[in-house]
Amino acid sequence: MLKPNDTHITATQLAGEISRHLNLSLGKDAAHASLYDWRMSLSLALRDRVVAPWFASTRATYEGQHKRVYYLSMEFLIGRLIEDVTINLDLEGVVREALADLGQDYASVMADEPDAALGNGGLGRLAACFMDSLSTLAIPAYGYGIRYEHGLFEQHFENGQQVETAEGWLAQRHAWEFERPEVAYKIHFGGHVADEDGRAVWHPAETVLASAYDTPVVGWQGRWANTLRLWAAKPIKLFDLESFNRGDYVAANAPERLARTISRVLYPDDTTEEGKELRLKQEYFFTAASIKDLIRRFLSEGHRLDDLASLVAIQLNDTHPAIAGPELVRLLVDHHGVEMGAAIDTARACLGYTNHTLLPEALERWPEGLFQRILPRHHQIIIEIQNRHLAETGSDIRILDHGNVNMGELAFIMAHKVNGVSALHSDLVKQTVFADLDAAYPGRIINQTNGITPRRWLQSCNPALRALITDTIGSGWQDDLERLQELKPHLDDTGFLDRFDAAKAANKARLAAWLKDRHGTVLDPAAMFDIQIKRIHEYKRQHMNILETIALWNEIRDNPNGDWTPRVKIFGGKAAPGYALAKSIIRLINDVAATINTDPVTRELLQVVFPENYNVSMAEILIPASDLSEQISTAGKEASGTGNMKLSLNGSPTIGTLDGANVEIRDHVGPENFFLFGLTAEDVRARRAQPGYAREAIEASPRLMRVLGQIAEGVFSGGDTHRYGDILHNLWEHDYFLVSCDFDAYFDTQREVDTVYRDRARWTRMAAANTAGMGWFSSDRTIRGYARDIWGATSVAH
Ligand code: 26Q
């Protein structure tokens, strides 16, 4: 392992390196350089610092014959890399000084990098945090995914409604990656399987090339760097010259068009759109390339395939790469002559599967006909896998069922460990979706509660709090987050609490300035900043939050001289383009904002802000500035949540239900520092069994009745009484997510929040207790758990 200072450089040296890249890599002189040129030159200079640890890590892994972890994920929601690298190399001061010497502003240069938004939300961001922790812990690992040309769509609001435009992060050169034209695999689709002398031979109809792009991921203090390898699809032949010569220009471009489509765009998490052929092709494309790549690496080091599972661990981030099981079996059997049963056993010993959702509509299923058409040999192998499973366990759970290929069952049966992402979620995985498979394979399901990287989500995004923590307990907490407990003796020290408060105030001022700049909104920095940031979904219940906002607005108007606690409700999040109800919720929030923000009676006391296009970079500004974290999902629906962890770590107490990791957060920060309300997962189940529960709950709450009446009358829609018919109908008639049942408890708990917030000393202590209690939620702890319980991988630290 390298010593931390091997990547060190002085400000003068760095300024020289930046200038050198400006001249030689970008072909610009300082007089004509744009912000882009400076940012790119800095990035290249920083990237140079990463290369030595990267090579050293590769060498150490190879020489020690260490087990390698392969993390397969359709999504890596990385955000910007420039600040990550700066922070992990401990170069922030040096970069600031070097840029200042060159007449450039640190913040502007950092903010110039486009977000790498190669993910939808929690699952993709978890993969990015895991990459950071794997490098920090010096566990040899590769992240494998897709180099989408267009990441998650950009969100704009037109008349309060979400419209989507294509994202284009690769329009500019991507500074951090290394193209590997020599690392390319042919990936096949379609065609048929022939029996040739008792051997199955796949004669595919289509072939594309998977071409590798590597990004080094450097860990804390540059001690180790792993690789994120993303695959881009390319045509096997660039251009059909024959067609061109015939004058058929469309046909001439066909091979390129076909291939490029595969890695063109990230699918927005869209559970309403089923059976999309391109999505299945994407899944197989990156999974097959990754499996081929890891087998090539393994064989090139002279190992025997019998030993695969002792040197290779493959983790499936949800079912999206679940085809890895059959693909690995296919390569072992068809290409390497391994017997089917042995191949299945080997594959299973390599594979682990992480489940991230219980929502039935989100479990991946493919129409069997489509699947068989695209992957005919894999279809045969799945039949083999299923037959063995049925025979060995006596279970009647099938992968191929009712004309579908169930990817959850496939992933489960092909993995030696299956994990949920919070204690509650893992229990529910056992009791619900995989109850029968749990009985067939006892002990296979385990829990690994999610975590977040404290490097990005505290050290980097919250300089004010970072300084206070380091002044109070010294450095070292960045890779040993449990040390935050050492803050606990300071929770009654007014000097410490004053500084904690001042840090929060600074972050709120930063957010207020940003919002004014971006949004034109002027906020009272003394008001409570109440934040709900996450994808828009009924189960996350942003609509409950906005209904509560309306109820509060009513009560302030009824009693304008009451003892109110000023609040700013801040929302951030995108709705899947095809999810009509989620889009209605966005519009309602924006409509309510337009109405109440201009109300002279209440505007000093209550504001609603919804900046468009929430992404990782916006999260880095919002999270440190939050006073109150909204984690209000219907109990039993949020697998874990990770935003909840980021907010609490940054000194923002939670108002929340007993759902996902909220349960464990509450245990760690102490119930007295958490505003709990609402039905439990068990209550939810019982309530759903009562006919007419929704209507009954609404009719029992005059406050909610009034709010729903106002929406129906068009108070927030300029008199349009139909605009929110969908939301209202849903709440009155089904309310599957029990907004009505939890509403009063939520409202009352919010008033309790108001009261505590007015007691500044008490509030600050509560906020600081959150930070002090959150050490366990480092993704370093999570990764240690995976390494120990699933991968059998160890750190190469020595
Ligand atoms: C499926 C089919 C077609 C297209 C897209 C998808 C798709 C894409 C992304 C389905 C689901 C996702 C993402 C799911 C996700 O982010 N789940 C979240 O995972 C987090 C990390 O474990 C948890 O903290 C959250 O609770 C969980 O919602």
Image: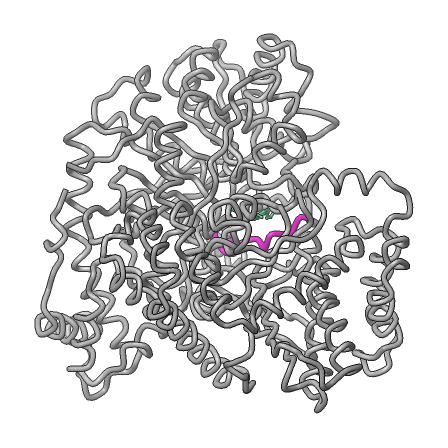
Residue 743 x/y as whole percent: 76, 59
Q: Which quadrant is home to the N terminus? A: top left
Which residue is pictured at 16% across the width and 58% down the height? 49
Q: Is residue 343 left or right of residue 409?
A: left
Does residue 580 appear anywhere in the picture?
yes
Q: Give the range drawn in magenta.
A: 260-271
Q: Which quadrant is home to the C terminus? A: top left
Residue 619 x/y as whole percent: 47, 65
The question of residue 264 being in magenta is answered with yes
Q: How is the model colour-coded?
A: one colour
Query: Which quarter of the figure has residue 105?
Result: bottom left
Residue 495 x/y as whole percent: 33, 70
Q: Is residue 166 left or right of residue 780?
A: right
The question of residue 733 being in magenta is answered with no
Query: Which quarter of the figure has residue 582?
Result: bottom right
Specify the principal SS of the magenta part: loop
Q: Is residue 718 left or right of residue 53?
A: right
Residue 434 x/y as whole percent: 63, 27
Residue 644 vertical placement versus 683 (above, below) = below
